[in-house]
Amino acid sequence: QASERFNFVLSDVIICQSVIRRKFAMKRYGEMLVKRDASALSIQKTFRGYNELLNYHVKIADIITVQSTFRRKIAAKRLYNLRETQLAKEEHAATKIQAAFLGYLGRIFY
């Protein structure tokens, strides 16, 4: 009878140990899943941030290219206008000089 009782107690202890070990194993597995998910989220977050940073730099480069193109066109237009203004001033000055000289010649030979 004592050996039967011992076998029943031993069987109960083994079942209790099995249940407790299973519970601990499930808890560790759950923690591992949480850690794995957190690691995956961290990797995704880092990649998305890096990808957006690259997109930002490309957009900035595009903006700078467009700005420099428009500034170059505006500068070329200003230069053209300045040259036209300068040319008009020079032509006006040449006309005045010619008129004065022709008037002088006309007074001398009249």
Image (cartoon, rainbow, N blue to C red):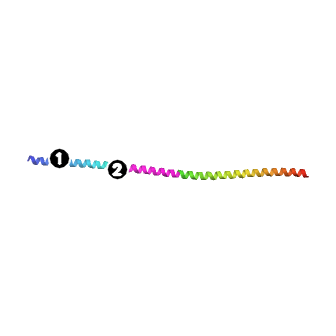
Q: Which mark is residue 25?
A: none
The structure residue drawn at horizontal position 83% and vertical position 51%, both measured from the top left corner, is 99
Label 2 SS: helix
The structure residue drawn at horizontal position 81% and vertical position 50%, both measured from the top left corner, is 97
Label 1 SS: helix
The answer to whether residue 108 is left or right of residue 74 is right
Question: Which label's residue is closer to the chain start, 1 or 2?
Answer: 1
- Residue 79 percent coordinates (x, y): 68, 51
Highlighted range, magenta: 37-59
Q: Nearer the viewer, residue 68 or 13?
A: 68
- Characterize the local packing of mark 1: few (<14), some (14-19) or many (20 or more) Cα atoms within 10 angstroms: few
1 vs 2, front mark:
2
- Residue 21 percent coordinates (x, y): 23, 48
- Residue 56 percent coordinates (x, y): 50, 50
The answer to whether residue 49 is left or right of residue 12 is right
Please give the residue where the numbered disc 1 appears in the rendered image.
13
- Residue 83 percent coordinates (x, y): 71, 51
Q: Amino acid at mark 1?
A: Val
The answer to whether residue 101 is left or right of residue 46 is right
Badges 1 and 2: C-beta atoms under 8 Å apart? no
The structure residue drawn at horizontal position 19% and vertical position 49%, both measured from the top left corner, is 15
> Is residue 104 on the magenta stretch?
no
The structure residue drawn at horizontal position 12% and vertical position 46%, both measured from the top left corner, is 6
> Is residue 52 on the magenta stretch?
yes
Please give the residue where the numbered disc 2 appears in the rendered image.
36
